[in-house]
Amino acid sequence: MRSRRVLVLAALLAAACEVEHEAERGAPVEAIVPGLETAAAAAETVCDQVRGAGAVAAEAEAPEVRDARAALAEAEARRTLAAQQVERLTALARGAVAPRKELEAARAEETSAAAAAARARHVLAVFGPGAGGTSLAPDETWLMANVVQSDLAAVAAGAEARFVPDAFPGRAFAARVDAAPAYVDPATRLAPVRVRVRDPGRVLRPGMTGAVAIEVGTPRPAITVPAAAVVYDGPQPVVFVEEGPGRYVPHPVRLGVARDGKIEIAIGVAAGGRVVTTGAASLLSATRLPVGAEAD
């Protein structure tokens, strides 16, 4: 008899553990949540994004580009002056007025100045043919964004972008890439990207920092849900899907692009499915309650 009671007790414990595990694996939640709201998962077209940090700039040139342009101007001026000196001393040498030694020194300076100008021209060319940028529209301002070098090849001129300044959290400014990144800063290992930002209200100021998102690649179909529908069970993002009146099933999901208050669901939800928005966090808490706790 004693061994039979032990076996029965073990079976009951195993059944209780199985019920608990089923709840953890995503059993339907039938909790009463005041004010619960749902929305349909939508089929939309999205692009992948490259993210980075940016700062509003007073001019189109990055400091290193400006320095390279100044170095080229200085080298060209030195070369021109040296050429003029050679020409003058050559004329004087014909009349035996200028010593041969001065003429040779002037020619050496001209050669050195020409080499310096060639080096400066090469450095400036590295920054791309449009390093200085074109003129801005009346409602635009410059932004210098920085992306990691592994994303450099994906960013193209003309790509749509968004800028969310730290000074105006939650407010996104439409932007467009003016020129693809042409180099990587050896100090930061980041690639500068020149961006035009639409600022009709003229509220952006030089030096303002913020987050930049640049669209890259070919547009593709995707499933999106409101950002409020995504909650986190530890590190795992979860969306509650309505599978009947008052029945909500937690679906682990893999997230994609986030934009305009919506998040792409790469895996986990089908188009048209009703997902919980308001009240999703409360449902997540209900899944963590011990079995029978709601009745208490």
Image (cartoon, grey):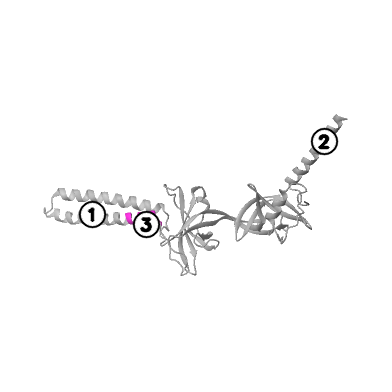
Residue 11 appearing in the image: yes
Q: Earlier in the sequence, mark 2 or mark 1?
A: 2
Residue situated in front as seen by the camera: 207 or 194: 207
Q: In this rendering, would 67 be left or right of 230?
A: left
Element type at mark 2: helix
Q: In this rendering, would 42 be left or right of 203?
A: right
> x, y percentage for residue 27?
76, 48
61 in magenta:
no
Which range of residues does the magenta coloring cover? Answer: 62-71
For image coordinates 82% across by 38% down, the residue present is 12
Q: In this rendering, would 279 be left or right of 5?
A: left
Element type at mark 1: helix
- Residue kind at label 3, given as amino acid type: Arg
Quadrant housing residue 75: bottom left
The image's mark for residue 270 is none
Say whether marks 3 and 2 touch (CB < 8 Å). no
Q: Tell me the mark number nearer the camera, choosing from 2 and 1.
A: 2
- Residue kind at label 1, given as amino acid type: Ala
The image's mark for residue 66 is 3
The residue carrying pointer 1 sits among few (fewer than 14), some (14 to 19) or many (20 or more) residues within 10 Å by Cα, namely many
The residue labelled by disc 1 is: 82
Image quadrant holding the N terminus, namely top right
> x, y percentage for residue 131?
41, 57
